[in-house]
Image (cartoon, helix red, strand yellow):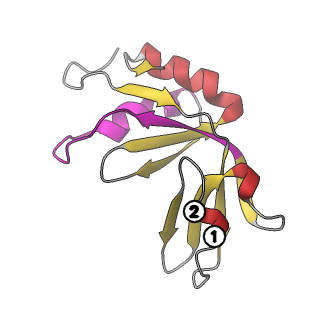
Amino acid sequence: MLDAHKPPLPLRVLGERLAVCRLEPDAEVPAWATVGEIFSVTRTPDELSVVCPEEVVPPGTTSEGGWRALEVEGTLDFSLVGVLASLTVPLAEGGISMFAISTYRTDYLLVREAALDLAVAALRERGHRVS
């Protein structure tokens, strides 16, 4: 059951298959990295990380494909505590690998497409609404 202090969250499964890519830390952001319904580009001192549609990743790029995104619908207030935990704990307990992306407005969970049905079931079991 969902913690009584944490209301259920509405999520929706996005249709695009995504890839998580690693480029060199000093690489320019490639044009292919910024297309699609959802993409994310993050630079750290160690890497340039890109999440983008799987089909646009050039051959030879270090990447892991086959991810699907679940979007937390609506705007999340910055004062909320435990949002990601309420979503990631059921997945971890189910042995489901995930990758999180947070934006100013909301959060996205990426799960392997092969585990999508299991992820949806685990989230629904905890009271979250997934469409």
Kind of residue sitting beneath label 2:
Thr
User: Is residue 88 left or right of 49 when viewed as pictured?
Assistant: left
Q: Quadrant of residue 115?
A: top right
Q: Is residue 44 shown above or below 78?
A: below
The residue at which mark 1 appears reads as: 31
How far from the left and from the top, in percent, is residue 103? 36, 52
> Measuring 47% from the left and 47% from the top, which residue is drawn there?
100
Q: Secondary structure at mark 1?
A: helix
Mark 2 burial class by Cα count in 10 Å: few <14, some 14-19, many 20+? some
Give me the residue at 62% from left, 21% from top: 117
Q: Are marks 2 and 1 in contact (CB under 8 Å)?
A: yes
Q: Quadrant of residue 11?
A: top left
Residue 99: give x, y in percent of width and height: 53, 47
User: Element at badge 2?
Assistant: helix
Give the residue at x 45% y 36%. Answer: 71
Q: Which residues are magenta?
A: 66-94
Query: Which residue is identified by label 2?
Result: 34
Report the label total: 2
Q: Position of residue 93 (x, y in %)?
A: 50, 28
Graded by Cα atoms within 10 Å as few (under 14), some (14 to 19) or many (20 or more), the crowding at tag 1 reads few
Q: Position of residue 47 (x, y in %)?
A: 57, 75
Q: Amino acid at mark 1?
A: Ala
Left or right of residue 75: residue 118: right
**Is 56 on the left or on the right of 88, as rendered?**
right
**47 is within the stretch colored magenta:** no
Image quadrant assignment for residue 15: top right
In the image, residue 29 sits, relative to residue 58, either above or below, namely below
